[in-house]
Structures are given as C-alpha cells and as structure tokens.
Amino acid sequence: MDRIKNIPCFAKLSETQLEKLKKISAIKKYNAKEILFYEGDEPKYLYVLLQGTLKVYKTNHKGQQIFLHQFYPGGLVAELAHFENIPYPATAEFTSNSEVLRIDYAALEKDFFKNPEISMEIIKSLIAKHKILIEIIQKEVILTAEAKVAKFILENSELFASLKNTQIASVLNLTPETLSRTLGKFKSSGYIEQDDKHQLSILDKEVLLAML
C-alpha cells in the first residue's frame, strides 16, 4: 500500500492521512479480459490503475465494441461517473494482467475532498478526460480511415511490434480488412515500412501529417 504515495492525487498527504486512506482502500489483482465494471453499473469505488492496461468501450445496437480510451498505470478511472452521480457510461476491460487500487468513494468524499491538493489533482484529471473526449469526437467524426491509421502510426508506431493488427483495428474502430488495406497502401506508396518482426518505421512523416 506504500504505492499510494506515488499517485499524484495523494502524493502530498501526511502520514496520518495516508494511514486513514489505506483503511478505506484495497488493492485487487485482475487477469486480462476481466471486467472492472460494465456500462450501466452504479459506481461505488474510485479506481486507480497501478499496473497493467485497461480499455474502455461502449457497445452499439449491433453488439459491436466502440473503443474509447486505453488507461495506463497512475491514472484515475471513470471518476466523472461519481461527480455526475450517474451509472458508468461505458465498460472497462483489462487488456493485460493488472492491479487496481480500489477506494471507497463515499468515505473518500467525506474525509478527503476538503484537501485542496486532492481537489486540484482531481480537477486536472477531469480536464484530461475532457481532452480525451474531444480527441474521440475528432477521431470518429472528422478523421477518415486513412487519417486514423496515419495518426496512430505517428503517435504509436512502436506498438505495431507488440500488438496484432486485429487489436490495433479495434482501437481505431476499423475492421481488420480496412487496417490491412490502408497499411498496404502506405507501404506501396513508400510512406512506411515493416520488418519481419512487424517493427514499423516511418519513411515519409510529412505525408502522414498532411492526412490529419
């Protein structure tokens, strides 16, 4: 539980406050593909991802997953549901073996929200979530399939060596066929290249940037 000190929200708490926080918290381990919460569940805990990766998605009327965001260690997860007093608006599923700090939200609100350091960090987290929402809207409404792939390559080219194309397609809300076809076009046009280990290299960054 000493890892609580490394979480930005709680880094400046006194030892007494940290001990109080530990009493309303627990660390839970999850396996890949386990669900942290489902869309529509009532929020009871504030979650902080300590280790692993967690994806958040919505499901459309056809039962298809619409990827929204991927969380990495250190961030608050779905805190907006607590502040708005609404059910979780999406489902959260672990994409690797993970550890989560689970905090009783009612107790946290009662005993800690008067602390300006915690309040400021939570405000920062909410602002970051707003930026994520803007990026999602831009990606889904404005960007073409080619622009989505170009943006992902520019920001995450190293992931092509560790993720399958089906996983990347899911993140981009594209079919695997569309992703494969777009990558093939980029390769044949000389924008990118991939080695035998699927490590991707950008050959013409300016052309990819121009697609955005």
Image: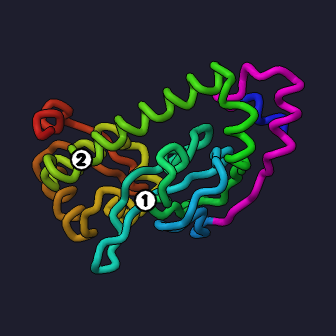
Give me the disc on residue 89: 1
Judged from the image, the secondary structure of the residue bearing numbered disc 2 is: helix
Label 1 or label 2, whichever lies nearer to me, is: 1
Q: How is the image coloured?
A: rainbow
Q: Identify the residue at image location x=12%, y=40%.
A: 211
Q: Position of residue 45 (x, y in %)?
A: 66, 52
Asked if residue 32 lies left or right of residue 188, the reply is right
Q: Is residue 101 visible?
A: no
**Residue appearing at x 81%, y 37% in the figure:** 21
Asked if residue 59 lies left or right of residue 140, the reply is: right
Q: Tell me the quadrant of the picture where the C terminus can be found.
A: top left
Please state which of residues 133 and 164 is positioned toward the viewer in this rendering.
133
Disc 1 residue type (three-letter): Pro
Q: Secondary structure at mark 1?
A: loop
**Relative vertical location of residue 139 with respect to residue 129 in this rendering, above or below:** below
**Is residue 25 a member of the stretch shown in magenta?**
yes
Location of the N terminus by quadrant is top right
Regarding residue 98, the answer to whether it shows in the image is yes
Q: Crowding near pointer 1: few (<14 within 10 Å), some, many (20+)?
A: some
**Residue at (23, 64) in percent of width and height:** 180
User: Of residues 87 and 2, which is closer to you in this image?
Assistant: 87
Q: Of 73 and 194, which appears nearest the observer?
A: 73
- Mark 1 or mark 2, earlier in chain: 1
Asked whether, in this view, residue 85 is left or right of residue 65, the answer is right
Q: Is residue 113 above or below residue 29?
A: above
Density class for disc 2 (Cα within 10 Å; few <14, some 14-19, many ≥20) is few
Q: Which residues are magenta?
A: 7-31
Question: Residue 114 is drawn in which quadrant?
Answer: top right
Identified by mark 2, the residue type is Ile
Reading the image, the residue beneath label 2 is 137
Q: Position of residue 99 (x, y in %)?
A: 70, 52
